[in-house]
Image (spheres, rainbow, N blue to C red):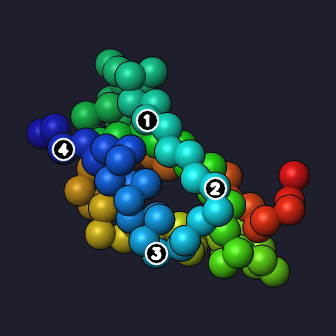
Amino acid sequence: MTKPHVTAAAVQQQLMATLAPSELEVRDDSAAHAGHAGAREGSHLAVRIVSDRFSGLTRLARHRLVYDSLSTLMPQGIHALVIDARAPGEP
């Protein structure tokens, strides 16, 4: 059974509302995974986000914040999520 795919716009809207980023890019890489088994399970997305909320947090804690922010969208059709989460001023 094929799951619906969550759009990059929905992810962007949710992250803007919950993490108030100063920079945010959400890219849908699903087309690059067409034909592979996971493609039926939902979207393949990449997020680059810069937020004050990440200051002083470990990489794991930052990823947890992003996953927590997307907790209602994850079961609706996100198969893979690549996260680049930084605090302001980090390269």
Q: Closer to the N terminus: mark 3 or mark 1?
A: 3
Q: Which residue is mark 2?
A: 23
- Label 4 and label 3: CA atoms lie apart by 25 Å
The image position of residue 8, as x and y in percent, is 38, 44
Instruction: Kindly identify the amino acid type of the residue bearing the numbered disc 3.
Output: Thr
Three-letter residue code for mark 2: Glu
Q: Nearer the viewer, mark 4 or mark 3?
A: 3
Which marked residue is nearer to the observer: mark 2 or mark 4? 2
The quadrant of the image that shows the N terminus is top left
Give the quadrant of residue 56: bottom right
**Residue closest to the eye, 23 or 28:** 23
Circle 2 sits in a helix, a strand or a loop, which is it? Answer: strand
Q: State the residue position of label 1.
A: 28
Which residue is labeled 3 in the image?
18
Q: Residue at x 25, y 42 (%)?
A: 5
- Classify residue 13 as left or right of residue 6: right
Q: State which mark lies toward you, 3 or 2.
A: 2
